[in-house]
Amino acid sequence: MIHALFDSPWYWWSAALLLLLLEIVLPGAFLMWIGLGTVVVGIFLWLFPTAPVILQLFVLAVSIVGAVLVGIRWSNTEKSSSRSKLNQGLDQLVGQEAIVSQNFAEGRGRVRVEDSFYAAYAQAPLEVGQRVLITGVNANGLQVQACLKGDQYENKRAPI
C-alpha cells in the first residue's frame, strides 16, 4: 500500500506544493528547502519511473542538502553584495547630492536632500540653489562641498 505512493511523480510534486504553501503560511525558510527537494525527487521519478523507494529517499536526502547549501550560499552573497541602509541615520546620506537652501555664513547653512532640510557646514562659501555633495556627518550636521564638474567647481544655480 505504501509503495503505491512512491509510484508516481505527482505524489512528490503534490507534497512539494503543500510544503511550499506551508512555507508561505509558516515562514522560516526551512520547509522551502524540503519542498525543493521533493520537486527534484518528482523529476527524478518522472525520468526513472521504476526507481525503488530507497533510491527515491536517497535522492530526497541529497537534494534537500543540496538545496540548503545553495540557499546558504545565495543568502551569504546577497547579504554581502547589498549594504543595508536600515538604521544608519544620516550616514546613509553620505555620497548623495543636495541643494543649498540657505546661504552659508561662516561655514554654516542649510541644505535640502529630497524633501528634508538639514543643517550643514562647508569650507567654501555656498549660495542658495547651488548643488553640493554630502561628504560626511557629525554632531554639527552634514559636511558638504560644492559639486565638482571635471576639475572645476560647478557654480551653477540649480532650481529648488
Image: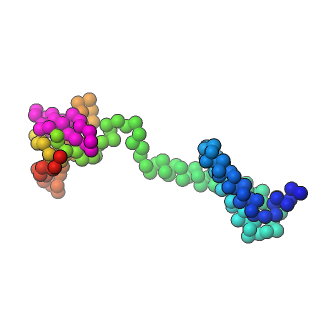
- Residue ID at (82%, 68%): 50
* Label total for image: 0
- Give the image location of residue 89, x and y in percent: 35, 36
Q: Quadrant of residue 16?
A: bottom right
Residue at 82% of width from left, 64% of height from top? 7
Q: Is residue 34 left or right of residue 112?
A: right
Up/down of 62 relative to 144, above or below: below
Could you say where residue 36 lies in the image, as x and y percent from the top left? 66, 56
Residue name at image x 18 percent, y 36 percent: 110
Which quadrant, please, contains the N terminus?
bottom right
Extreme residue in the top direction? 139
Within the magenta stretch, is there residue 111?
Answer: yes
Colour mode? Answer: rainbow
**Residue 96: image x %, image y %?**
27, 46
Q: Is residue 134 visible?
A: no
Q: Main secondary structure of the magenta part?
A: strand
**Left or right position of 103 against 90:** left
Magenta-highlighted residues: 102-124
In the rendered image, which quarter is residue 2 located in?
Answer: bottom right
On the question of residue 152 being in view, the answer is yes
